[in-house]
Amino acid sequence: MSAHENDIACPLIDMIRERSLKIRNGRTLLDIVEATESETEELRAEVEQVAAGLAPGSDGVFGESVDVTLCAVDAIIQENPNRSNREILEKAREKLDKWERDYSDKIRKDR
């Protein structure tokens, strides 16, 4: 469970937080970003492979997407281990609202 007594449960965040805080190898936030970039490159390769009509690798788009997600949430936790699930989910809600506003008409407004 998260560190905040009155926080809300989120099994995915709770699982990542538990594992993230167990890792004691001197890694920095920059190390986590570099791992995220590596996983994103692997995701791109999977997408390109599938788009080319080739068989996916062992993790496929699904597994590589999960890797990117785990790395990204790990960065959130490492940046501030006391950030609550409620805060993370509220920020996710804000970002999803922005996605819906900016992308619902199918035209990327940021390009």
Image (cartoon, helix red, strand yellow):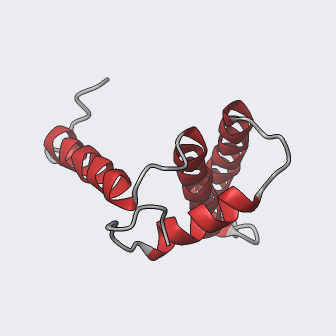
Q: Is residue 107 above or below residue 3?
A: above
Comparing 104 with 1, the one in front is 1
Is 16 in front, or is 56?
A: 16
Q: Residue at x 69, y 49 (%)?
A: 39
Looking at the image, which residue sits at the far right? 25
- At x 74%, y 61%, the residue is 22
User: What residue is shown at x 68% (from left), y 57% (from top)?
Assistant: 21
Can residue 50 be seen at all in this image of the molecule?
no
Q: Position of residue 94 (x, y in %)?
A: 23, 46
Q: Residue furthest top?
A: 111
Q: Is residue 105 left or right of residue 32?
A: left
Total marks placed: 0
Question: In which quadrant of the rendered view does residue 18 lie?
Answer: bottom right
Horizontally, is 81 left or right of 23 in the view?
left
Task: Look at the picture and state if 107 lies above or below 63.
Answer: above
95 displayed left or right of 51: left
Where the C terminus falls, by quadrant? Answer: top left
Residue 13 at x, y = what percent?
49, 65
> Where does residue 109 sit, x and y in percent of width and height?
22, 28
Viewer-side residue, 35 vs 107: 35
Q: Please tell me whether residue 1 is drawn above or below residue 84 in the rendered image.
A: below
Specify whether residue 94 is in view.
yes
Which residue occupies 60% across, 58% down? Answer: 70
Question: Residue 75 at what x, y percent from top left?
Answer: 58, 44
